[in-house]
Image: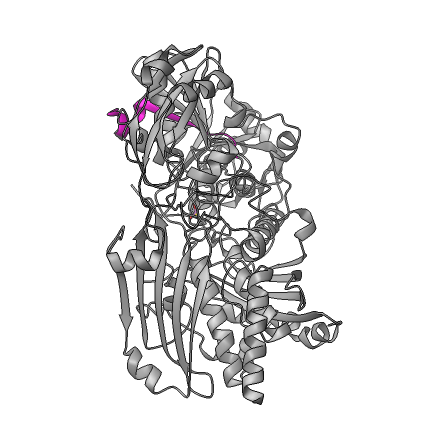
Amino acid sequence: MVEEDALDRWPAGPLETVGRPAERVDGLARARGEVTYTADLRLPGMLHAAVLRSPHARARLARIDVDAAAKAPGVRAVLGPGELDVLAREPGYHGQPVAAVAAETSGRARAALAALAPEWEELEPLLDPDEAVRRGSLIVEPKRYRRGDVDRGLAEADVVVEAEYRTQSLLHNALETHGSVCVWEGSRLTVYTGTQYIWGVRDEVAEALGLAPDDVRVVCRYVGGGFGAKNEAGSFTLVAAELARRTGRPVRCALTRREENLDSGNRNPTIQRLAVGARSDGTLTGLRGEYVCSLGWDGWLPSTAGPMQMLYACENVETVEYGVKVNTPPMNAFRAPGFVEGTFGLECLLDELAARLEVDPLELRRRNYSHSDPLDGRPFSSKNLAECYRRAEPHWARRDEVRARSDGAWQRGVGLASQVWYGGGGPPSYAWVRVGSDGNAVVVTAMQDIGTGTRTAMAQIAAEELGLPLERVRVELGDSARGPYAVVSGGSSTVPSMGPAVRAAAGDAARQIREIASQRFQVEERVLALQEGHVVSADGGSWPLEDVTGLLGDAQILGTGARGPNPTGMRVLTFGIQVADVAVDVETGEVRVERIAAIHDVGRVINPLGAASQVEGGVIQGLGHTLSEQRLLDPASGEVLTQTLDAYRVPTIADVPEIVVDLLDVPDEHLTNLGAKGLGEPPIVPTAAAVANAIRDATGADVRSLPLNREEVLRALRDRERAVAGQAG
Ligand code: MOS
């Protein structure tokens, strides 16, 4: 059931609470360590699980001693290979679960893994993605897209640029590793878990165990980050549930940091063979892309060609994407999956084209602006990318000054890249609001806040609609047994999906309050409004809200709200541009990013403070992806070498540049009662390309392979020198 929104649109710009910076409602408690994450949970009688994982990329289990492990000290249950679907006898990647034990302590559980004494027959792994394409080792059919005639488009071009780009595999490394605690009460299961999708875990676990959906209760009040890797139940949850069933005790199964870097998903590496043609004025005549996405042993094919298909008005586009199956850990969604990788290739290609055409890169993007969806001509619900470009100008105009600060080996430059991504959200999603006699409001919904601050945004929306100060609104979330269905916190969809439902529920409660007030004060309901904790009337009357709600006694006002549909026949997307200033040491290849200006159009901004922190987080994570992070494999064995945070280098505070956040804050007039889109993913999309283009601006070198470490920068510089020498010769 999807109800339509019956609320007037709020005016643009800051209101009383919405649109004004709000500190996180749970910020202090979290910083003080007063809240309980799943990782903190210790239930009475709880057992600890440990998982035996394949040390090989491909192997057959020759022998395993389940009985010996069962007799090891403190062990209460053992699951051998094949006892659950997620426990493999012939593992296809390093880190794949093979067996599990539950014991009185985690130390005893780990010790019991040694007692399993597995013997392996090692098999030859398939690791090379191009070889996998040749052999037809694919997880899905190749995804082909075509519009117009690319061969003709490229033939008609004045300039054609072809290049190959590569992106690496990345590990999410959320602060809180994956984990669940499972408890049975009779035939009902409670799963405490760190998740981006309470309802998805409920359904997945119920299906796996043959239970009715509501026989599984999923609880997740606080999460230490997800970034796309916590959308599913995960093998650890199913292992904990089964061990808990067998032992009649609560069981905790949580990944160590090393396990996290083996088996919690990754951003899949890509090889992108791209071509672009343009007329001398910069008009694109053709775009072609072949994308080889190395998904690993399992996973799905994210849209890596999406930016090429969606960002520019180009009549002739042809793409093919291969999702190959190889003996590496399965990919998982990672903050704008596909688009981060595809934008790196496309936006570097555009800059290489701009250099060949001698057209200004910003101007090149303007000349190919799409005013309707290039895929099917649908109008956009809103698109203010041109305004983002306009606001980028002063940052872009600094480049002469930045270049002039080049000094000896340190060369400086500025680059930019555009962003397109989804983020409109959609139905269904529900919220309830209850108001008691004290005149305070509680929002109840079974959504999750994965660390992005959506709890705070929901409180602001309800406070705005009820005319209450923020501190008089509480948000209760994170429990499938204690609130209605809420959307996955993925695809930048929590605020645009949940926000309108929360506003609708608060609006329903507000209407009931006005109705009671109109009877109480003998005033027509239509002249009453809720403001600053008061009921006010158009003729100047004003009564504290408690004068109305105080009449309730133990009665409560209950409002319900649902997310309405997205506008039909329209395309809902987010847009933006980032401008990067970099310094490159041309002797060592070291890159320092000095400044990023991030300008994004995500509709109405609910909490400018929280939104800025999302942009900063996205940019910083993006810089890690650009410069230092990389999952390394032993090229012969397929063993994952980067299992710890000293080997896998996420950025530290010393790597963080000046970040200028500029959000347009223009409500989308066609989208919901809020006009708000999502912001979780947009800021990570263009960062790598903007930095790569700045390196080209600084040095003339075409960096094409992430991460842009010293090796890659020096390679590109040497290529550049050879090309220049060749021309001189
Ligand atoms: Mo996200 S990477 O859409 O969970």
Q: Considering only vertical position in the picture, is 7 above or below 184?
A: below
Count the marks: how many?
A: 0
Residue 11 can be seen in this image: no
In percent of the image, x 66 and y 63: which residue is there? 588
Q: Which colouring convention does the figure follow?
A: one colour
Q: Quadrant of residue 487?
A: top left
Quadrant placement of the C terminus: bottom right
Between 127 and 46, the residue placed more toward the observer is: 127
Reply yes or no: does residue 108 show up in magenta.
no
Q: Considering only vertical position in the picture, is 625 above or below 30?
A: below
Return the x and y of residue 424 as percentages of the image width and height: 42, 54
Return the x and y of residue 433 as percentages of the image width and height: 46, 33
Q: Left or right: where does residue 150 sit relative to residue 219?
A: left
Between 69 and 293, the residue placed more toward the observer is: 69
Q: Quadrant of residue 569?
A: bottom left
Return the x and y of residue 310 as percentages of the image width and height: 38, 67
Q: Which residues are magenta?
A: 208-223
